[in-house]
Image (spheres, rainbow, N blue to C red):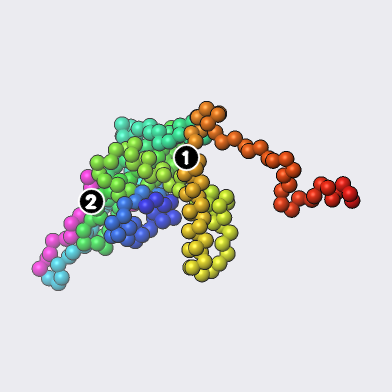
Amino acid sequence: MLADAGYGIDTAFRTALTDLGLRYSLGIQSSTSLWPPGTAPLPPKPWSGRGRPPTRVRRSPDRTPLSAEKLARSLPETAWQRVTWRAGTNGPLASRFAAVRVRPAHRDDRRHEPRPEEWVLIEWPEGEAAPTKYWLSTLPPETCLAELVSQTKLRWRIERDYQDLKQEIGLGHDEGRGWRGFHHHASLCIAAYGFLVSERGRFSPSAPEFTRLQTPVLPAGYRPRGAPDPARASRA
């Protein structure tokens, strides 16, 4: 599951995805609170013998989480690597990234145990004064940095597919308010887009010119539908 920070900052949304067995790479804000690698909230207070035994984890003045930005700035220089994730229009797309295992800390002092560890992926391009993007990801702990970046950056391709579906195939033309109409319209658009993508994939952009499709020659006397008849126009 890939999404921007509008969804990634919602702790309940991330928890629901995990409960459904779905892995995610979701954008988060620089202010998102995280427990740095190797740290976690304190265990519940010892029971004094009176009242209910404490069950919630806790924090202390010297044991508090950090914001994602402060965590990024605290990482050593060796944590940052240059990663190329795909070919772009004007050349390979690359930037500087770091990824460490953390625990999300949002309102975890209301929980009975710390949240599980997951990846925080941070992009800090060279020359920038501060990191530019942050993500939380539940990809496996053994995932390498290059794979983590590649999977997370797939969201751009999905956005581009959605844009083509709306502008070129007609997904954005549906003005219905019923599920059945939208479902049928969307299904036809997706089927048409899948066909066009499969056809486009048959021809490599670097293939020789003779292997590409050629514009067909129009037959003599061809007249597009709706065009005026030249014979009638000449008589007029």
Q: Residue at x 18, y 60 (%)?
A: 44
Q: Few, some or many C-alpha atoms within 10 Å of disc 2 (few <14, some 14-19, many ≥20)?
A: many
Residue situated in front as seen by the camera: 234 or 126: 234
Q: Main secondary structure of the magenta part?
A: loop
Residue 47 falls within the magenta-colored stretch = yes
Q: For mark 1, what is the residue? A: 201
Residue count near mark 1 (Cα–Cα under 10 Å), binned few <14, some 14–19, many ≥20: few
Q: Amino acid at mark 1?
A: Gly
Q: Residue furthest left?
A: 49
Using residue 107 as the reference point, say whether residue 218 is left or right of it: right
Tell me, yes or no, whether the two marked residues, 2 and 1, touch with CB atoms within 8 Å: no
- Cα separation, mark 2 vs mark 1, equals 48 Å
Per the image, the residue denoted by label 2 is: 40
User: Residue 208's x, y, as percent?
Assistant: 52, 27
Q: Amino acid at mark 2?
A: Ala
Label 1 element class: loop
- Name the side, left or right, on which 6 lies relative to 100: right
Does the stretch in magenta take in 214? no
Q: Which residues are magenta?
A: 31-49
- Point 48% across, 58% down: residue: 187
The x, y position of residue 45, in whole percent, is 16, 60
> Going by the image, does 187 lie left or right of 101?
right
